[in-house]
Image (cartoon, grey):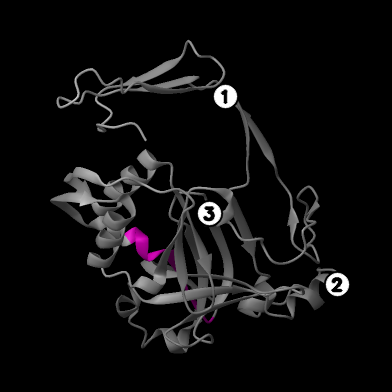
Amino acid sequence: MFTCSLQQIRISANYDKCLNLDKRSHAMSYQNKASEAQMVFRIGGDDRLFRVMAFEGSEKVSEPFSFILDLAMEESAANDFMFEGLLGEEAHLRILSDEEDRYVHGIVSKIESRGETGKFTLYRFHLVPKLWLLTLRANNRIFQKKKTDEIIKEVLSDAGIPGDRFRFALTGSYQQREYCVQYNESDFDFISRLMEEEGIFYFFEHSKDKHVLVMSDSNVGFQTIRGNKNIGFHTSDLLVPEKEIVFQFSFLGQITSGKATHTDYNFKKPSLDLLSYDTGEHTELEQYEYPGRYIEKS
C-alpha cells in the first residue's frame, strides 16, 4: 500500500514587516513583498491587536486541525493585556492571496508568553476546532434504538456545539443501534469510534466567521478547493516566493492487513450466518473481530 501525505505547512512573515527591523541586505523584491501584510490574526473583533510573525498548521482527514501562531504585540499594549480572557475565544487567521484569501477559524486552546524583542512582546497561540473540547469531556451513558448520526448529533449538542457548526453529508443509510454504550470514554473518543465503525470520516470547512465540522461517507462530501488548481513545486531556499508553493512532498510505502473479518451471534436466530469480510492484498494478514456488535446483516 502506498500513500502520499501533505499534512503540515509553516509560513513565516518577514520580520521587517512584523518587528520593524531594518535589514538592508535583502533584495528589493523581498522588501517590496514584505511591505504588504500577508497574514492577519483577528480575535475579539480586533485584527490590529497582534501582528503575525509565523504559523505552523496541520490538517488531516478525521483529525482535529491544529495551528500554532507566533504573534507580536506592541509592548505598550501588552502592559494591559490579560490573555487569560482570550482562552476559549473564537479567532481566525486570514492568509492573504492574489487569488483568494484563506481563512482558518477556530478557538484558542492555549496561550504562551514568549518573551520580548525590541518594543514587542511575543506570544504563541494554539488554534483548534470546537470539536477538540470534546477531548476534555468524559461520560458514561446508554443510547437505545438510535442511528449513529442521531447519537453523534446528541453528543455534539450536549457539548454545546450549535447545529450550524456541524452537518452530515451521508450517502448511505444506517441501521438503528439496539444498545450503544459510552463507557469511561471522552465524548471525542466515543463519537470517533462510532464513525470509524460505520466508515464515516470528517473534515472542517472554514470561513471568517466560523468553522463547520462535516461528516461524510464518500467523496461527494468534499467540495472543490477554490483557487488555482496548479501549484508550483520548488525546493526551499533563502528567497521568499511570490506565490504559494509546495517545497516538500513525501511518499510512504507500508505493509497493511489484507483481510478484515467480523462475525457475531443472534440468539433469536442461532442458525443465521453473520460472517462478513473484505479483502485486499496480503489476505494472510487477517484482522478477526468477535463480537461484531450486530445481529443482522445489512
Q: Disc 2 marks which residue?
A: 29
Tell me the mark number nearer the camera, choosing from 2 and 3: 3
- For the record, the magenta segment spans 119-132
Q: Main secondary structure of the magenta part?
A: strand
Q: Disc 3 marks which residue?
A: 59
Q: Is residue 283 above or below residue 265?
A: above
Q: Secondary structure at mark 3?
A: loop
Q: Are marks 3 and 1 in contact (CB under 8 Å)?
A: no
The residue lying toward the viewer, choosing from 28 and 65, is 65
Q: Secondary structure at mark 2?
A: helix
Q: Is residue 46 above or below residue 165?
A: below
Marks 1 and 2, the one that precedes in the sequence: 2
Q: Residues within 10 Å of mark 1 (few under 14, many from 20)?
A: few
**Amino acid type for the residue under numbered disc 3:** Glu
Total marks shown come to 3
Which quarter of the figure has residue 179?
Answer: top left
Q: Disc 1 marks which residue?
A: 254
Which quarter of the figure has residue 177?
Answer: top left
Disc sitting over residue 69 in the figure: none
The residue lying toward the viewer, choosing from 291 and 203, is 291
Q: Residues within 10 Å of mark 3 (few under 14, many from 20)?
A: some
Marks 2 and 3, the one that precedes in the sequence: 2
Q: State the image coordinates of residue 240 (x, y, percent, origin top left).
A: 77, 63
**Amino acid type for the residue under numbered disc 2:** Ser
Marks 3 and 1, the one that precedes in the sequence: 3
Q: Are marks 1 and 2 in contact (CB under 8 Å)?
A: no
- The residue depicted at 74 percent of the width and 62 percent of the height is 244
Tell me if 42 is positioned left or right of 80 in this view. right
Q: Is residue 282 above or below residue 126?
A: above
**Amino acid type for the residue under numbered disc 1:** Gln
Q: State the image coordinates of residue 25 (x, y, percent, origin top left).
A: 81, 68
